[in-house]
Amino acid sequence: MKRYTTKWMMAGFVLCLCFSLSYLELKAQQLNLDNVVKAGELTLFQEVQNENAYYYLTDKPKLAKDENGKPKFSFLRYVKNVRSGAEEAELREGEGGGIVHAVVELSVSEDQLQEARQALKRIDPNAVIKGPVVYRSGTIALISSFANADGDLTKQVIGLGKAPIIDGQQAAISVQLTKKGAEILWESFKTSTPDMSISFEMNIDGYRSPKRALIEADFEQVYEHKNFQAAVAAPILAAEIKATFDDLVKKGAIKVTQVGEDQNLEKIMETAYNKLLEMMFQPAGGTGTPSLGALGSLTGGNSPSLLDRATTMLNTSRAEARTENDRIRRENTAERARAEAERRSAQNQPTNENPPAEGTAPAADSDSTGGAVRPDTRYHARRPSAPSDDIRSFSPTERATAEPTLQEEVSVPSLAITASYEMKRIRQHGIFTIDLNKYTSDNLSMRFDGNFGELKCTSCFHQVNLDDELYKQRELLAMIDGANATDFGSFINFATVSLRKKHQNGDYTYDEVRVDRNNFNKEGNIFKMLYGWKGDSDRSKWMEYETKTSWSFFGGHSTNGEWTRADVNAITLSPPYLSKNIHVEADPDIINEKGVRAIDLKIYYKIGDHEQTKSVTLIPKRSEFSKQVSIIQPKDATDFEYEFEWTLAGNKKVSSKRMATNSAIIFVDDIPENN
């Protein structure tokens, strides 16, 4: 008996160790978001502390398959008969909607990896590809086409949702569709070439390279913008926030002061916008996934719904991309003509009798990489007319003399269209200032699409009338919203959702699902519960049931929900505690002037009645003046406390007092003299 107990203890230890290593791998990645290399078909991010280490982006999605080769995809469309009132016009259609679930692989082939390694070696012989970029979170938009009143095909955003990251480089997506969205997609799948694409916006954490720029924002003016006034009462899309920030820059409420020249102003603005967004907004509903009602309903007055606004932003972004590509093609044509003219002129010149000495460096704009080029700016929506860091590829014959400096066409816009936010209850005040002349923690939203075409899987599609007399066993789908597999290895132990159905004959049906990291990965974040028919003569009452959700967190804390009545087909489970990012910033000039050798920060927050502590250290000698740390808080909580300590020469310590704040940014470069 003892031998078997030891065996299971060792198995549990190994399992926990695997979870810990996966979590540490996520935390260990310190990516330079500005230094990007295109090697073969892969996009690589360089590590901040190790210039020879690279991580590749998994941006080529495909549907995952089970062990029998069946796609991990399901589409349930449901309708419900509705009677019209005595004073209402005759209803010819019932209510309805749909649920799409899929598990998507985010991986690359070994051949693609090998090609990337060979290409990377040509520009850096010591370079090593260490593994895939670990996404922090993901948002998806389900897009299809339908014929408008003029008969033209129009792209329509029919669903928005999260893309929880599960182990094995996969993402599980579950999207609830409105009645219109379900109808559009169902009709599309009837065709020989279904038009269903999933637009991914996957977020990665990293650092921006130092830039000689100062960002200032007057919060009093920022909050006065009409778009942000409207955001007090309704969710707002990330793209709408970005457009509003653009307008505030034009009006002078947000100022950017550059010292010297920086070719890529857009990266500076992107960093500034991300900082302001995290200070002013939080994901809608705590997770960023809008409710089904919010997707299709109007936001007040004659304002369009969230889905309609997302569709407008999508089409606007595509139109901007087409316009930008037209400009790029015109300039590339002119550049090729210029280079060709120089080449012909060079051929008519006398031969140079004094060629450069062997070993002379090539011209600054030549390309000798033979397959790897850096950096990659294809994720930017707009570019300067003559950028210095565009990707360029040349054939051997073109390298002989004058080479055209070509711009790469924009493939997709870089702005996020699907993530939805809501205004934080506590507003910021005064002038916010941040100096970007240091490595600054930031996040980057990577946009890519997957079109899965025809699915030869009849069992993947289900259509049901909820009022059909033959429909006497109801299957409910439960899914976790706002948590990834790594969350189950870092602060969530498990979640339990319980179902209670009281039938009209007095009997009860109970069902329960326990979600931990193992089955979260195995089931792809879709869990099923069901109840049957026991003397339920009233169809509408048969649709009603009750659920209760309990959560267990690290540190022994747990929450037990109340029984809640519902009648929907999908149950969304949102953790009562969510991971929130705190940015730690220090001014390099102040820190170096004071001779600070290390900065130790402690953040204090509560899970239930238990106080938790999170620590982070900045080492100025390593150019560490900015870091990001995550804490766990209730959805609507923003308050926490912190203190920090400077280590000076001679191991002298200078400490701050313990202070309270609700800001998403902590500055640790100013200790009051009376401490």
Image (cartoon, rainbow, N blue to C red):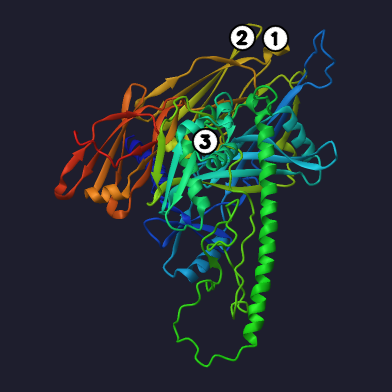
Q: Earlier in the sequence, mark 3 or mark 1?
A: 3
Which residue occupies the extreme left position in the image? 650
Residue type at mark 3: give it.
Phe
The residue to which callout 1 is attached is 535
Residue type at mark 2: give it.
Asp
- 414 and 93: which is toward the camera: 414
Disc 3 residue crowd, few under 14, some 14–19, many 20+, Cα 10 Å: many
Instruction: Using the numbered discs, state the Cα–Cα distance from disc 2 to disc 1 in whole angstroms.
Output: 9 Å
Q: Residue at x 64, y 48 (%)?
A: 449
The reply to whether dot 2 and dot 1 touch (C-beta < 8 Å) is yes
Disc 2 residue crowd, few under 14, some 14–19, many 20+, Cα 10 Å: few
Q: Quadrant of the C terminus?
A: top left
- 164 and 211: which is toward the camera: 211
- 158 and 410: which is toward the camera: 410
Q: Secondary structure at mark 1?
A: loop
Q: Quadrant of the N terminus?
A: top left
Q: Secondary structure at mark 3?
A: helix
Q: Secondary structure at mark 2?
A: loop
Residue type at mark 1: give it.
Gly
